[in-house]
Image (cartoon, grey):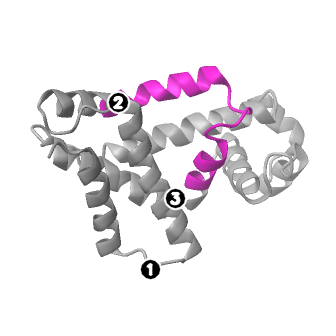
Amino acid sequence: MNKKTLIMRSTLKLITENGFHGAPISMIASDSGVAAGTIYRYFKNKEDIINELYTYIKTDFNNAILKGMYDDISSHDEYYLKWRNMVDYHINNQLEAKFMDQYATSPYISQDVVKSNLEKYSHLRDLYVRAVNTNVIRKISYEAVTILMLGTITQLYRTFNSKMFNVDEKIINEVFEGFWNGIKLS
């Protein structure tokens, strides 16, 4: 692993465990095995590391969402596949999911970085438009559909981590059906 990657992996681990202020550059340096001075050759400051880490994770997440997509997929199946890919990403990438949850609305993430990362998800808006225009889903706002979608995913991830309930295939599929029944055109 190169030094920049080591720095970002250590930052991810330490920030998700200890919070922003609980992960000073000296701790990142110690954990990554990279000298503090060397960190500043790659990044201006800790905020710069976090913004680059955020972009990296959001890109990785978007790539995971698109896994298995194929031409002529129905709107229902595309919603299911993308939704399921998001659930799987959260469950299989615990640190990244926690980081996205912690820093989604953080003042440490630059608004320019947030806006540029939102552009990666245009395929979700395209799906929404196609589903509304073909009378597959109700004419509720894109924002409401996105909140419902991400809300179910986030809660499944949190429930899985807390072990409050056994989150198995049956539960995962029932939660998707709940989401889908809330947006589909009856």
Q: Residue 54, percent across and down?
A: 61, 38
Task: Check residue 93 in the rendering and tell me which mark sits there, or answer none.
Answer: 3
Residue nearest the observer in this picture, 114 or 24: 114
- What SS does tag 3 mark? loop
In the image: residue 146, left or right of residue 80:
right
C-alpha span from label 3 to label 2: 30 Å
Type of the residue with mark 2: Ser
Query: Depth check: 159 or 122 in front?
Result: 159
Q: Residues within 10 Å of mark 1 (few under 14, many from 20)?
A: few
- For the residue marked with disc 1, what is the amino acid? Asn
- Marks 1 and 3: in contact by CB < 8 Å? no
Residue under label 1: 166
The residue beneath circle 2 is 141
* Residue 69 can be seen, yes or no: yes
Identify the residue shown where x is 67% and y is 32%.
Answer: 51
Q: Where in the figure is residue 85, as x and y percent of width and height?
A: 35, 53
Pointer 2: residues within 10 angstroms few (<14), some, or many (20+)?
few
Q: Nearer the viewer, mark 3 or mark 1?
A: 1
Q: Earlier in the sequence, mark 3 or mark 1?
A: 3
Q: Earlier in the sequence, mark 3 or mark 2?
A: 3
Segment tinted magenta in the rendering = 96-124
- Spot the residue most to the front: 186
Kindly check if marks 3 and 2 are in contact, taking CB atoms under 8 A apart as contact: no
Q: Residues within 10 Å of mark 3 (few under 14, many from 20)?
A: few
Identified at 57% across, 52% down, the residue is 96
Reply yes or no: does residue 4 show up in magenta.
Answer: no
**Which is in the foreground here, disc 3 or disc 2?**
2
Residue 66 is drawn in which quadrant?
Answer: top left
Q: Position of residue 79 (x, y in %)?
A: 25, 46
Q: Earlier in the sequence, mark 1 or mark 2?
A: 2
Q: CA distance from mark 3 to mark 1?
A: 18 Å
